Image (cartoon, helix red, strand yellow):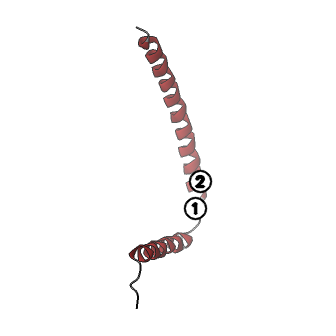
Amino acid sequence: MPMADPRALDAISRIERALARIETAAQRPAPSATESDDYLSLRDSHDRLRERVSGALAQLDGLIERGGGS
């Protein structure tokens, strides 16, 4: 009887663990309206932070360009 390929056994093990996680997630209740509001608030905060970081990076780029020529 040939030995099983360890990589194949490892792949099967990972698939079984992934299926267990999927089954667990499928049994969770749907998010409530409050969670949706929390998500929207978080998304808005993230967007504002992204804008601030983009502005700061643009300022840094300008400083580097002006300082790079000296």
Q: Residue at the top extreme? A: 70
Q: Residue at x 55, y 55 (%)?
A: 35
Label ID, residue 31: 1
Kind of residue at badge 2: Ser
Determine contact: label 2, label 1, CB under 8 Å: yes
In the rendered view, would you say 26 is above or below 42?
A: below
x and y, in percent, of residue 53 in the image:
49, 30
x and y, in percent, of residue 7 in the image:
42, 73
Judge by depth and name the residue closer to the eye, 9 or 15.
9
x and y, in percent, of residue 60 in the image:
45, 21
Counting labels gives 2
In the rendered view, would you say 53 is above or below 19?
A: above
Mark 2 or mark 1: which comes first in sequence?
A: 1
Judge by depth and name the residue closer to the eye, 7 or 50.
7
- Decide: few, some or many residues near mark 1? Use Cα within 10 Å; few <14, some 14-19, many ≥20: few
Q: Secondary structure at mark 2?
A: helix
Q: Which residue is mark 2?
A: 36
Kind of residue at badge 1: Pro
In the rendered view, would you say 13 is above or below 67?
A: below
Q: Is residue 4 left or right of residue 30?
A: left
x and y, in percent, of residue 48 in the image:
54, 34
Q: Residue at x 56, y 44 (%)?
A: 43
Q: Residue at x 42, y 12 (%)?
A: 67
The quadrant in which residue 33 appears is bottom right
Q: Quadrant of the N terminus?
A: bottom left
Q: CA distance from mark 2 to mark 1?
A: 7 Å
Q: Quadrant of the C terminus?
A: top left
Judge by depth and name the residue closer to the eye, 54 or 67.
67
- Decide: few, some or many residues near mark 2? Use Cα within 10 Å; few <14, some 14-19, many ≥20: few
Label ID, residue 21: none
